[in-house]
Image (tube, coloured by chain):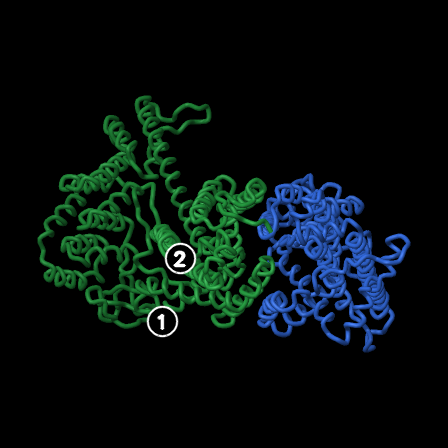
Amino acid sequence: MTSTVPLTKGGPLIVQLLREKSTSRFLMTLAALAILMPVLNLAVPQDSMFHVSTYTLTLLGKYLSYAMLALAVDLIWGYCGILSLGHGAFFALGGYAMGMYLMRQVGDRGVYGDPLLPDFMVFLNWSELPWFWLGFDQFWFAALMILLVPGTLAFAFGWLAFRSRVTGVYLSIITQALTYALMLAFFRNEMGFGGNNGLTDFKDILGFDLQSDATRNTLFVVTAVLLALAYVFCRWITTSKFGRVLVAVRDAESRTRFMGYRVEHYKLFVFVVSAVIAGIAGALYVPQVGIINPGEFSPINSIEIIIWVAIGGRGTLYGAVIGAFIVNYAKTYFTAAFPELWLFLLGGLFVVTTLYLPKGIKGLMDRLPVLRKTTLTEGA
Amino acid sequence: MTMLKWLVVTLFAGLCAAPLQAEDSIAEIFTALPKASFSQKAELMAQIAATESDQALDILQAIYDGNLYYIKADKRVGYAASSPEGFVLSDVFSGESLGEYGKRKVKKITINNSLRRDLSQLIAGFKLRAEEPSLRIQAARDMVNSPSTDLLPLIDQALKVEAVASVREVLEVARAATLLADRGADKQEIIAALGVLAEATDTNAINLVSRYTLKDRDGNYLEQDSDLVAAAEQALDSLNGRQSFYTLVQNLFFGVSLGSVLLLTAVGLAITFGVMGVINMAHGEMIMIGAYATYTVQLLMPNMIGMSILVAIPVAFLVSGLTGVLVERLIIRHLYGRPLETLLATFGLSLVLQQLVRTIYSPLNRSVITPEWMSGSWAVNGMLSLTYNRLYIIIFSFLVLLALIALMKKTSFGLQMRAVTMNRKMASSMGIKTGWVDALTFGLGSGIAGIAGVALSQLTNVGPNLGQAYIIDSFMVVVFGGVGNLFGTLFAAMSLGLANKFMEPMVGAVLAKILMLVFIILFIQKWPRGLFAIKGRFVED
């Protein structure tokens, strides 16, 4: 199920990693995408058949941030057996942190023209900025919060749950309860996050207009680069000795514990890392999509992430990325072309994948004789 | 006042009139009604009331509500209901249609304020003499809520003849309320009335009494007479105490009602989870299927709405149950020992089922008609009334629970089910066909979800997302109560329902729910297997 094959050649771990075929192939693809798309968008004239519209570019950027989220989920589910049904919450929290920064950037250009308060607060007749909105006018502070808020929540939640050995289905259910509770909370106007409508109508980021093609291209490239970094980081974790212990926890938790490993520490660490990656993904998602609302916390969204990973093939990292792309592309296509078929398809994918493709598309590729040769050499 | 006395006398004089004569005399009155002046109308209405016939109350009420019209052309009188063309009139006695008329072809029997007052007294008098004691209580209670000095002679009259104690009680309260409303009553009377009201169970009594305890800005009582203030304060204390008690009872009722809904939705989940270790994410959709089954049954028997809900119970059980067996055989069977994968597969299934229903029935919400015997509410007293549908659902959920317990404890299938829950491998070694038990258990759990759907269809609209609204709550109940233990589920459902309803008035519905979720997340930390973890030999996986 996993490719935690020991790396053979010497040298520092990072160098070994880059020498690994799957990693280098993944990074090459990502690099090609990050260079090609902006070129096709900016340099190729609009009437050319190779021109890529800004819409498509933004869509791909959105998929890239989803891919990062899938990566985060695969890290804990594929390698440590933690099935989190609430990872959308960390994604959304990162998104809200970014949204708050973007909201403060609007300044007095909002509908009500209040220099300090975002529109929705003026609408609710609030007279001053709530304390938790302070500091979000600074990018560095927002960036810090993007890492800290999901990380802290994951730490507190994981510390409680793993220490008391809540595992399996129970853990899945309480993660779901977590995201559900957050969704209900963020829907409340009194919370001060824009209630039902969330945060939207952003103007610019770091002084650059969000609507301009240049900014969009930059965001796309930044997302690709961060995805690459996250991938290498995850790969580094999973191929290290630490990662080997994670897999042991996944396959036989009690046995690992009896061998003297503090299982809960391992789980907690990887859970927090995963939450932070998910938060970054959310922060990249918001400026590209232009809105963040409590719907992102809905339990369905979080379960959908699981199917991206399951379809791509869990425990492979790049499988998660492939799965995120395929399912989201299908979603974009079907919800526009055959809206009533989409849920049949998505539901069917869940059933078929779990029944017949436990290793996802990656497993399918391994089984095809044509591809078998290359994957074998890859593993060696 | 003379006018009123005259009315009362006429009313009682008319008590012995025969019904057929009544119809004739009303018909006679109707010929005069359209042309009558307001003062003539007063006399005519008194005559209608004096007939003491079954229709008289309806007619007076219709005049009061402005629903009695006459046709300009032939001066016939009837109840009016608005229609696209104007109005449809129907005969007062036979209910037959008198035809549809444009707005200019008919005219309302108009009344003025003094007539309206007379009418309300006539109507109240009628209601006070109703056959059914409960109707008389209702009439008296209405007088407590809107006391009017004009009604005092009527109440006194009624008190003279009333024999039923419970009615007398309310009448006394009504009399006291009326006295308080009358500024001219003397002090002793008011103090006595305050004493009576202190024992009342009507919310309006508090308003009436508190008039005597109003304070000005400096904190001095507006009422000069200290005896009155003291009596009023005492009455208010007693009333407030009683009201907070009944509010408690009401909250308790709402809590138990919510708890019983949770019980119905969660108990099936608890069984499947207990026996198979499978969290069935499509459980909510089984509830939805049950609700749609109810809707379909009602469509098939439109003339027997009252019966259809009873028919729907076994139908919903069978439809959802068979779906469950099918799902178990086709999907879940292949995923034994991989509970997390089952969770994903059943989630996918839930999406498919939702879309299936959307395609078959349309995405819009459907409403299931509540049969007559389930609608309305039971007014225990003026401060407490319980809706029948919730009352029935509470009873129903307990019946379902009892049936389930009987099935688990008294049948061989139940024995096998419990054996598989405790130790699957050992049960299998003893010759129990665990696969067969699984399929039936899953069917049973789904079937009960279907029954829950029947109950829910009486509380909310039936839509494709019905199940989703309850699935997370059901999970919470199951993990809170512990797996495979029906009493655990009962306890968890009731305590969550009660806690929710008691927190709601304090912090609001949404925050109450959030607090419940947080509580459960923390609770699981301490008791990872729920409140009542089942005892058995488990191999930790």
Residue depicted at x 54% and y 59%: B281
Q: Give the left or right position of residue A365, taking residue B132 as reference.
A: right
Residue that mark 1 sits on? B300
* Label 2: which secondary element: helix
The local secondary structure at tag 1 comes to helix
The residue indicated by pointer 2 is: B455
Q: Quadrant of residue B110?
A: bottom left
Q: Residue at x 60, y 67 (%)?
A: A355
Where does residue A288 sit, x and y in percent of width and height? 75, 59
Q: Which residue type does callout 2 highlight?
A: Ala
Residue A168 percent location from the top left of the image? 60, 52
In the picture provided, is B142 more to the left or to the right than A153?
left
Q: Is residue B81 above or below residue B53?
A: below
Query: Which is more toward the observer, B259 or B138?
Result: B259
Q: Position of residue A239 (x, y in %)?
A: 79, 54
The chain that appears green in the image is: B
Name the outermost residue toward the right. A11
Residue sitting nearer the eye, A198 or A379: A379
**Picture quarter containing residue B404?**
bottom left
Residue nearest the viewer, comparing B279 with B109 = B279
Q: Which chain is blue?
A: A
Q: Position of residue B30 (x, y in %)?
A: 19, 62
**Which chain letter matches label 1?**
B
Dot 1 or dot 2, earlier in sequence: 1
Q: Are marks 1 and 2 in contact (CB under 8 Å)?
A: no
* Alpha carbon distance from label 1 to label 2: 19 Å
